Image: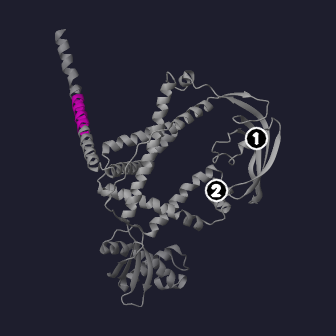
Amino acid sequence: MKINSQTTSEDHQLLLTVEIEADVMEGAKQKAARKIAKQVKIPGFRPGKAPYNIVEKQVGLQAIKDEAIDIMLDDVYPKLIEEAGVKPYGPGTLEKIDEEANPPVYQFRVPLTPEVKLGDYDKIRIPFEEKQPGEEDIQQVFTNLREQNAVLSPAERPAQEGDIVYILLKALRREAKDGDSELLPERSYPVVVEKADVDGKNEWPFPGFSRTLIGLKPGEDKSFPHTFADDSKFEELRGQTADFTLKVEEIKARELPELDDALAQSLGEYKNVDELRTEIVRQLTENLNRQARDEYQDKIVTQMIGESEIKFPPQMLHHEVHHYIEDIEPDLQSRGLDMESYLGSRQMTMDDLEKEVEPIVEERLKKSLVIMEASRSENIEVPENEMQGIVQLQLAQLQQMVSAQDMRKFLNNRDNVQSLVSRTMSEEIIRRTLARLGAIAQGKGEEHRKESAAASVSTEEEAVAEAEVATQAETAEANAETQPAADTGKENDNE
C-alpha cells in the first residue's frame, strides 16, 4: 500500500489517493466468495463450500467485488489512516477506483476531526453590568400573587375582565387534514378574561380569545371564524382558518386579596409584606442577573467565533442537524403531532426542515467547539471528588422526580449512569469555562485562574484528609476486633 497524494479540501475532509497491490484485492475477493457462499443457497454445495467460479456464476462478479471492497477496507483503512497521520471524525468513503492502473488506485474521502484555532480571546474586554428589578417588576409579582390567591364566587351577570369563564368549546378546520376537520374536540375549558392592556401573544387558543367572552351570560352561545396569524406560535396552523363554537357554562368572579401582612404570612415564613418584598427582590435580582450572565457569555463566545478559525466536516453538521430535529419530536408529541403531520402542516419535506434549521445548528456547533477549545486552552478540569458530589446531587434531584422502581431501573443500567456522568461532566466543564471567559472579559482572568488553582489544591487536600481519616478508622476498627478478649480476661481477674 502506497499513498500517492493527500490533500485537505475546504470542507475539512482529506482526499487520499492510494495504490493497493492487486493481490490484496484478489485475496479479498476469495474471502468475499466464501462469505457469499455461506449466505446464498447454491445447488449441489453445502453452505460455504462452493468454489469461486461457481459463486461468480451464481451471483455475478460485481456482487463479489462489492463484498470484497468492504472486506479489504476493514483491513486496509485503519492502516491507511495511521500512515496518513490524521484523526478522522468518522468513517471515510471510497470515492472511486482506477482498476486499469497497475497497481490499482483508490481514492478515499475522510472527514477530519474538527479543529479550532482561537484568536486572542485573552484580550477581549466587554463590561458586565449587574441588573436590579424595577418597581414595575416588583409590583407585577405582587399582582400575580394576589391573582393566584383570588377567592372565586359564582356570578350570574355577563362576563367581564378578570372573570374565570367556564366554556364548552370546539373548533373545526375549514380545510380538512387527512380527512379530519376537527381542530379542537368539544370539551370544557376554564378561561381567564384578560385585560385589554395585557400582552396576550401566548394566549390559548389564539391571542385575544378570552376577550371574545366579554358580555356573554351563562347559557349563551357564540360562533365565529378565526384565521391564525402568519407568526402564530402554532406553526402548523399558520394561515389556516377554523370555525369556533362555544357555550358559556359558568362564570366566576375573582376577588383579589389585599396586599397586606396576612397575605404575606399565608405565602410562607414571612412576618409582613416588607419581608415578602425583600424575598421577591432577591429572586428577581437573581433571575435578572442569571439572564444577564447568559447574554453576556453569549456575547463573548460570539466575538470569539468571529476571531477564531473553525473547521469541521459536513458530516458533523449533518449529524448535529439530525440530533436537533430529534429533540423537536417530544415537543411535537406533547402537542399531539408527529413529524410527518408537522411537515405536512407546513407543506415541507424533511430536506426542507434540515435546510431551515441548519444555520441555527451550525451556530450552536461553532459555539460548542469554541467553548471546548477554550476549556483545553485554560486547562479547565473538574476534580474527581467534586464530580462525585455533583453527580450525587443530580441523582438526588432525579430521585425526587421518579418512582423508587424507576430509580432502581435507572441505576441498574450502566449505560444510563455513564450517560448521566458524561453529560454532567460536559455541562460542568462548560459552566466553568464560561465563568473563566467572563472573568477574562472583565479583566479578572489571572485572578480567576489563581482562585481556581487554590480551590483545586484545597479540594485535593480535603480528599487526602478524607482518605487518611478513613484509613485511621479502618485501623482502629481492626484493632478493636482483638481488644474484647483481653478486657474480658481482666474482668475475670478482678472478680
Image quadrant occupied by the N terminus: bottom left
Of residues 7 and 259, the one nearer the viewer is 259
Q: In what element is the residue under mark 2?
A: loop
Marker count (numbered): 2
**Left or right placement of residue 227 versus residue 425 in this view:** right
Q: Do we see residue 33 in this rendering?
A: yes
Q: Which residue is the site of mark 2? A: 231
Q: In what element is the residue under mark 1?
A: helix
- Residue 299, by quadrant, is bottom left
Q: Residue type at mark 2?
A: Asp
What percent of the width, then of the height, locates residue 339? 62, 59
Q: Which residue is the site of mark 1? A: 213
**Left or right placement of residue 367 versus residue 85 in this view:** right
What percent of the width, then of the height, locates residue 60? 53, 84
Q: Residue furthest front?
A: 135
In the rendered structure, which segment of residues is drawn in magenta? Answer: 463-478
Location of residue 430 with respect to 479 vertically, above or below: below
Of residues 162 and 308, the one nearer the viewer is 162
Location of residue 86 with respect to 457 vertically, above or below: below
- Residue 77, by quadrant, is bottom left
- Residue 4, by quadrant, is bottom left
Q: Residue furthest top?
A: 495
Location of residue 283 with respect to 112 vertically, above or below: above
At 48% from the left and 40% from the top, the residue drawn is: 407
Q: Do we see residue 404 in this rendering?
A: no
What percent of the width, then of the height, locates residue 330? 58, 52
Dot 2 or dot 1, earlier in sequence? 1
Judge whether residue 352 is colored magenta. no
